[in-house]
C-alpha cells in the first residue's frame, strides 16, 4: 500500500487509502458480484491481462515538464510509461488513468518529433453540459416541411367538414364510398402534387429513421439508447401503443401512392377505379409490416480524426459519426410505392384485358376522379366543385379552372327523376356524367 500511495504526491496517506483503496477492496470482497468460486474474477483477470498488453503496446505514458533546480533555467521532460515492468507499484495508478481514458474523461495524444514520439495521456476533462447553438442546427428545411404537413392536414380537415355539410344538406343522398377517397382526390385538387410529394417524402423519411434517446450513464456520461432495446422491457400496453403509432405512420406513405396514381392516370385510364384501392392497401400494409418487423436501425462509427486550424492554439477532433436514418429503407419505401402501383395495375390489366372506358366524360372532373366518382354535392366538393342551388338553377364554382358555371334544371327533368325513383339524383349536379 505504501508504494502505491507514494505516487499520489501531496496527498496524506490516510486520504489515499480512503479515496483510492477502500472502495475497490469492498467491491472485490462483495460475494454478490464475486462468488466464492472466483470464476468471474478469473475471467476479469484474463480480460485485464489483454487490456494491459494493448496499453503497453501503445506505449502510453505520463509526461510532464519539470526543473531540478529552481535557479536553473534548464527544463526537463519527465516521462513515465503506464504498466512499466520496472515499476510495479505504478500499475494501480496506471489502471486509474486507463479507466478514465476508457470512460472518455482523459485522452491520449501522440506527439511525433524528429527524435522520437510521445504518447501522452491528458489530464481529466469532465463533461460539460451546455445548450446547442441554435445557429448550428439546420432547422429551415425541417420548418418548411412541418408547415407543409400542417397545411395538408388543415386543408383535408376543412374539405372533410365541407363535404359533411353538403352531405347533411343532401339528406344523405350521396355516394358514401367517395368520402373514403377524400385523401386521394381532395389532396390532388385542393393541395396539389408538389406539396403532397413533400408530405409523403417526410413521412417516408420518418419511417426510415430510428428514434434515439439521450440518457445518463454512470452519473457523469451521456449515452444514446435505442428504441429497439427499450422495447424488450416495455409493457404490453406500451407495445400496443407503439404498434398503433407505427401502423398510422405507415399510412402516410400512401400520399406518394396518390401522387403516382394521379400522374399515371393518363395510362391506367379505365383501370384506375379497380386498382387504386388495392394499391393503397398494399402500400399501407407492407410498409406497416416492414416498419414493425424490421424497424430502421441506427449506425455508429468510432474513428478519431483531428485537425489543427491554429498551431498551439486550437485542436478540432471528431470522434465518430452517428446516423439515425437509413437511406436503404428510404429507397425501399419509395420502391414499394412505385412497385405497388405497377403490380396492381398489371394485375387488373391481365384480369380484365378488354375493359372498355366509360362513355361519359366531363371537363369539370379532375383526372383522379374521372373514372371513380358520381358527382353528388358532397363528392363535387371533394373534387373542387362548390355548388349552390337556388330554385331550379345550380351555381357552380370550379376551383380547378377558377370559373363560375350556371346550370339550369327544368321542372320536367326533376319530375322524370322522381318518376324513375332516382331520388338520389335530385340533389346531384346535372350534366356531370
Image: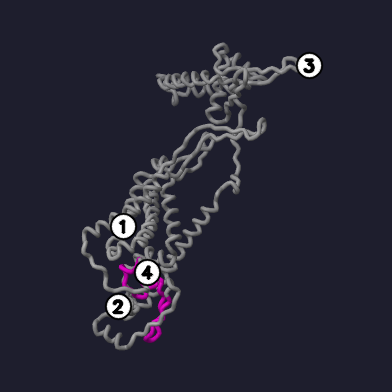
Residue matched to label 2: 424
Q: Are marks 2 and 4 in contact (CB under 8 Å)?
A: no
Residue 30 location, x and y as percent? 47, 24
Instruction: Identify which residue is drawn at 67% across, 30% down.
Output: 312
Near-viewer residue (249 or 368): 368
Which callout, 2 or 1, points to the residue nearer the camera?
A: 1
Quarter where residue 348 is shown: bottom left
Q: Which residues are magenta?
A: 368-397
Q: Are marks 3 and 2 in contact (CB under 8 Å)?
A: no
Q: How is the image coloured?
A: one colour
Q: Which mark is residue 71?
A: 3
Q: Is residue 188 visible?
A: yes
Residue matched to label 1: 279
First-in-chain label (3 vs 4) = 3
First-in-chain label (2 vs 1) = 1
Give the distance between the C-alpha atoms of the residues marked 2 and 1, in whole angstroms.
30 Å
Give the distance between the C-alpha atoms of the residues marked 4 and 1, in whole angstroms.
20 Å
Q: Callout 1: 10 Å neighbours few (<14), some, many (20+)? A: many
Amino acid at each position: 500500500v505504501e508504494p502505491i500511495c507514494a505516487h499520489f504526491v501531496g496527498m496524506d496517506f490516510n486520504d489515499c487509502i480512503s479515496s483510492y483503496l477502500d472502495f475497490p477492496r469492498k467491491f472485490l470482497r462483495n460475494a454478490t458480484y464475486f462468488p466464492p468460486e472466483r470464476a468471474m474474477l478469473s475471467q476479469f483477470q484474463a480480460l485485464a491481462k489483454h487490456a494491459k498488453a494493448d496499453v503497453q503496446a501503445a506505449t502510453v505514458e505520463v509526461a510532464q515538464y519539470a526543473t531540478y533546480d529552481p535557479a536553473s533555467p534548464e527544463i526537463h521532460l519527465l516521462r513515465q510509461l503506464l504498466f512499466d515492468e520496472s515499476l510495479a507499484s505504478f500499475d494501480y495508478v496506471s489502471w486509474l488513468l486507463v479507466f478514465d481514458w476508457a470512460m472518455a474523461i482523459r485522452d491520449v495524444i501522440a506527439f511525433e518529433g524528429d527524435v522520437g514520439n510521445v504518447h501522452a495521456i491528458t489530464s481529466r476533462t469532465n463533461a460539460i453540459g451546455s445548450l446547442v447553438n441554435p445557429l448550428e442546427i439546420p432547422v429551415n428545411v425541417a420548418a418548411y416541411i412541418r408547415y407543409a404537413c400542417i397545411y395538408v392536414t388543415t386543408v383535408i380537415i376543412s374539405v372533410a367538414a365541407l363535404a359533411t355539410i353538403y352531405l347533411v344538406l343532401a339528406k344523405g343522398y350521396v355516394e358514401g364510398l367517395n368520402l373514403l377517397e377524400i385523401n386521394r382526390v381532395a389532396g390532388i385538387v385542393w393541395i396539389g402534387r408538389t406539396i403532397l410529394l413533400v408530405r409523403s417524402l417526410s413521412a417516408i423519411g420518418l419511417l426510415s429513421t430510428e428514434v434515439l434517446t439521450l440518457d445518463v450513464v454512470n452519473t457523469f456520461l451521456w449515452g444514446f439508447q435505442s428504441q429497439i432495446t427499450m422495447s424488450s422491457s416495455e409493457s404490453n400496453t406500451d407495445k400496443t401503443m407503439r404498434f398503433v403509432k407505427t401502423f398510422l405512420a405507415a399510412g402516410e406513405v400512401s400520399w406518394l401512392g396518390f401522387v403516382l396514381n394521379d400522374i399515371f392516370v393518363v395510362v391506367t385510364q379505365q383501370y384506375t377505379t379497380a386498382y387504386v384501392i388495392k394499391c393503397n392497401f398494399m402500400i399501407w400494409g407492407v410498409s406497416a409490416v416492414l416498419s414493425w418487423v424490421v424497424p430502421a436501425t441506427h449506425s455508429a462509427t468510432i474513428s478519431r480524426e483531428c485537425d489543427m486550424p491554429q498551431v498551439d492554439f486550437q485542436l478540432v477532433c471528431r470522434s465518430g459519426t452517428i446516423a439515425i436514418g437509413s437511406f436503404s429503407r428510404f429507397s425501399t419505401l419509395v420502391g414499394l410505392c412505385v412497385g405497388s402501383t405497377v403490380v396492381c395495375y398489371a394485375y387488373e390489366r391481365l384480369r380484365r384485358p378488354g375493359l372498355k372506358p366509360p362513355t361519359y366524360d366531363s371537363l369539370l372532373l379532375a383526372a383522379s376522379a374521372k373514372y371513380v366518382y358520381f358527382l353528388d354535392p358532397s363528392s363535387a366538393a371533394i373534387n373542387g366543385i362548390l355548388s349552390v342551388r337556388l330554385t331550379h338553377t345550380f351555381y357552380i364554382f370550379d376551383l380547378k379552372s377558377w370559373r363560375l358555371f350556371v346550370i339550369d334544371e327544368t321542372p320536367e327533368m326533376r319530375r322524370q327523376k322522381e318518376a324513375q325513383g332516382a331520388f338520389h339524383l335530385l340533389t346531384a349536379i346535372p350534366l356531370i356524367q
